[in-house]
Image: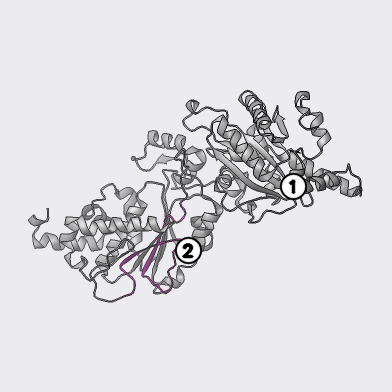
Amino acid sequence: MTQNLNSETVDKLRRKSKESLFFFARAILGFDDLTKEIHRNVCRSLQDFKNSPRLAVILPRAWFKSTMGSIAYPIWRSLNDCNVRVLVVQNSFSNACKKLQAIKQIFEKNQLFRALFPDLLPTSQSTWTKECLTVNRTASHPEGTFEAAGTGTATTSRHYDCIIEDDTVAPDKDAMSGLVQQPTQLEIEKAIGWHRLTSPMLLHPSKSQVIVIGTRWAERDLLGWIIKNSPEYKIITRAVKEDKSGKPDSKGKIIWDRFDENVLSQLERDEGPYMFASLMLNSPTEAINQVFKRDWIQYYENTPKDIVCCTSVDPAAAAREESSDPDYNVVLTTGISPSTGEIYVIYYTRERMTSGQLIDAIFDHYKAYKPISVKVESIAYQRTLNYWIRQRQSQLQQFFYIDELKSLQGSKVDRVRGLQPYFANHKIHIRPHMSELERELLSFPKGSHDDIIDALSMQRDFWFDVSDSYHMEKKKDLRYDPLSGEAIIDELLSRRKNLNSYPADIGLMRERYLDSYPEKYRRDYV
């Protein structure tokens, strides 16, 4: 290809490449999916770093924003200044190294690029590793030309002309379905925290460039934080559909024919309406419209000792063959402090399980946390499950109270909404690693799954009974009455400390539970 180019053509191509990032990316690097209508304006804004050193690029998924911003643009900067130092940051160090690998492949294998810019190719003295690439330059710097970092990477005493934060908020996919999941607040806070530390890493506090590239995930994600708190940033944002004024509109005009109506309809079906609005329209659900707000979520590390536990089971009756993305089985245990009413999500098992595996999980929760009640919906398949749980109890001689929920009141959506007051009043605490639970809360009711929060909602009456009984008896000052709620709770807590003395952990308000228990099973508890 390059052998037939005369010196005049080479000079022209070199000059035009240095003048236009868009031309360079399409004609030289071969990124011919980039279009004038969508990408040329973004390229112009990227290369206008002297006038706009702070830039946020917000584009839908798969719109080649990383191709422009994290691969083509760093190389383009090196064309115009061989001594430039660029840091590419992603949510993980390994992902950032993948971007450097793409740059590395261009320098090593793109013959047109190598022919046009031989003076830039690395020498035997150049650093050329997966995390640091150094072109042939005229100055000596401790930093490479292109370096990689994750939001957890230490970059002390290193300084750059340009820092590119590319999709630093990027959660994992669902392990079973492959669907993209909404990031947790911890993931978002990690990206925001890293972003706020970029200033000390700039060679010049105002002239060095910071680029934030990404897709919207939530109202209060990194890009939302920049829009609200950083007026110095130039914002470029596009959506797959826009109205006449250029604002995102689900009923507006399709902007790029690559994503036509058929493609967008399929994406909306696959991702769900909530994630589609965030990822493709860059219009995440506003906090005022969310059932559960991010700032309601409370984390905890150590479980208090004075708690009473309950386990609930969501058997997920939908068979795998009936759905391309069947529900999960969930076994979830919480503990409530009777004196404070604080609720702690202790542990949950969330998998697609056979009946035998589900029963194993239930008994694992019982052995670990000794819940005083195990709640299982008692209809159709679930009723059969209850039978086999009792068979296992007899076999293992491990008896616990099974609360058969024969008729759950209201729809699932209404039941889950019933959790809203608990979260709004910061009464429910979860562990930081419970990302599936947090994502279900934040995306409800438009998320792909709600199995964990459905299991959580099954315990509301239990929390009310424990707290109400404790405080009613407290007010009556029946501290020494052996039949008072407080006395029963104290007895339960003492049982937890000496479980060997009690062959059956029956639970709170024993007489009431036994009255509602089927006659043929009462003998196990008397």
Observer-nearest of 262 and 248: 262
Q: CA distance from mark 2 to mark 1?
A: 47 Å
In the rendered structure, which segment of residues is drawn in magenta? 141-170
Task: Residue 18: tell me if it is visible.
Answer: yes
Report the number of numbered marks. 2
Tell me if residue 163 is in the magenta stretch. yes
Most common SS among magenta residues: loop
Residue 195 image label: 2
Task: State the residue position of label 1.
Answer: 496
Picture coordinates of residue 388, whole percent (x, y)? 63, 27
The local secondary structure at tag 1 comes to helix
Question: Which image quarter holds the C terminus?
Answer: top right
Picture coordinates of residue 302, whole percent (x, y)? 66, 56
Three-letter code for the amino acid on which mark 1 is drawn: Arg
The local secondary structure at tag 2 comes to helix
Picture coordinates of residue 370, whole percent (x, y)? 70, 43
Observer-nearest of 257 and 433: 433
